[in-house]
Image: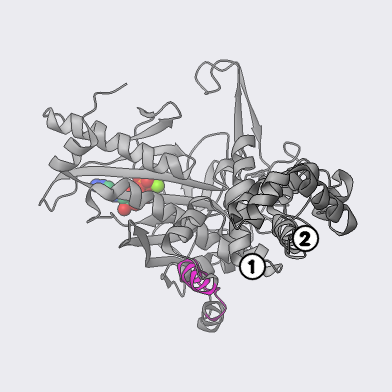
Amino acid sequence: MSELVSYDEAVAAFEPVLGLEVHTELNTKTKMFCGCQNSFGGEPNTHTCPVCLGLPGSLPSVNAKAIESAIRIGLALNCSIASWCRFARKNYFYPDMAKDYQISQYDEPLCFDGYLDVEVDGETYRVPIERAHMEEDAGKLTHVGGSGRIQGADYSLVDYNRAGTPLIEIVTKPVRGVGAKAPQVAKAYVAALRDILRSLGVSDVRMEQASLRCDANVSLMPWGSDELGTRTETKNVNSLRTVEAALTYEIRRQGAVLLSGGKVKQETRHWNENGYTLPGRSKEEAEDYRYFPEPDLVPVAPSREWVDQLRASLPEPPAQRRARLQGEWGLTDLEMRDILGADALELIAATVEAGAAPQAARKWWLGELNRLAKEADVELDAVGMSPVQVAELQALVDAGTLTDKLARQVIEGVVAGEGTPAEVVEKRGLKVVGGSALDDAVAAALEANPSAVESIKAGRQQAIGALIGAVMKSMKGQADAGQVRQLIMEKLG
Ligand code: ADP
Ligand code: MG
Ligand code: ZN
């Protein structure tokens, strides 16, 4: 572990400057430069061909759909789109890429000069985007024996299924003017980027499956200075929470180095899940990669008409959509913040779409379902109940078939895999009971509680609670309390 100063001490002395590089895998059907299936996982080395295995004599060709996705991403990030650009070879020797080079873009990115506005604590910060360029992913190495790293391993296995997956790398300009909020702005930026990519439908954006990866650069400089400090780049940042945690840690570590009169070393560091960063390899310089224009591919030259057409068909930006839904649903800022915090917006929107009232949809997703998801330690969308089923449940409540209390039991059943809400109601016998069974239960309760009856007749209305309680108990909760109250009042005149 390194020396640290407190976060407050570090940001009192220095202004943090951010640089965020986000890689995202595109969910095209096929790979970037060949016709192999582009999908996560699979039996190792089954989604491969001479092109993505880098066999001599094979030739790549560009996946038009990947270019289309890249342009749509660039447009959604307010970028300019190059009218002509080329791919570049980034040369390096490592067995995760059989060709010994990666096809990437260097000084001619497809998208450049954009920005993304993000909100933190009610304030808007503009994150300037330098470029969004295309490249291909490398294969996956598994080091066997030892600690799982290459050092000390007995042998390494390579799987080229992922080699050639289309990637977009989105790189910010140095982000200044965010001050002590730097880690939160970084987190909000990655979250906003994720929302945009999701709304475009171009990526699965699952950080835990590494389809969205972030390298977090940060440097410190004395307040008022105009010269950027030396940055470090932290890798392995694979959740929103870690973006914030890793940057907070690096600011404290660099602050300690600088305050004790030392110099920050420019290096790549790795985030360790136990809450600190460790130095990795020292960084290659661009010249080490011997970039040159890829001779096997023609330049990419999207027509203005195509770009305009893609621009016109962009979906509503997520931030705007959120504001619109909040208005339509009549929610307060606080309610909306809870929804976003629980990552429940899309689920609630789909539930409303399926016919439920917004407040009801919100109640189930943030209440019972959120609780069950936490209990099972899964994401809310993997809890085991679909938005359509939640709408179905609410329809049963609206129809008087279920009370809220019974509905919670139905949710438990659905999540446990017992079937649809209607099936669970049937199987578990959870229907609200009315009719003569309820009439009998009310009559029995009145007879068994004469003093409560007397009290009510004498005008002490609050005594009705005991009677309702008695009826609900004898009905095992399968009655509607409002209906019971009404029946009692009728019986007592
Ligand atoms: P590399 O290829 O070494 O990762 P890039 O230029 O691709 O370098 O990305 C570095 C990231 O760090 C970019 O987002 C860039 O804007 C940012 N950056 C560059 N210099 C600094 C600095 N001194 N402090 C903080 N961020 C920086
Ligand atoms: Mg980089
Ligand atoms: Zn292939």
Three-letter code for the amino acid on which mark 1 is drawn? Ala
Depth order, front residue of 484/173: 484
Q: Is 417 displayed left or right of 100 in the figure?
A: right
Give the percent coordinates (x, y) of residue 389: 75, 57
Q: Residue 319 in the image: state x and y as whole percent.
A: 45, 67
Residue 202 in view, yes or no: no
Q: Is residue 323 magenta?
A: yes
At horizontal 44% and vertical 72% (from top left) the residue drawn is 82
The reply to whether the magenta stretch includes residue 297 is: no
Reply above or below: 101 against 236: below
**How dense is the environment of label 1, judged by Cα within 10 Å: few (below 14), some, or many (20 and up)?**
some
| Mark carried by residue 491 | 2
| Residue that mark 1 sits on | 357
Label count reads 2
Is ligand 1 closer than 8 angstroms to the Cβ of mark 2? no
Q: Which part of the image, by quadrant, shows the N terminus?
A: top left
Q: Quadrant of residue 234?
A: top left
Q: Which residues are magenta?
A: 312-328
Dot 2 amino acid type: Lys
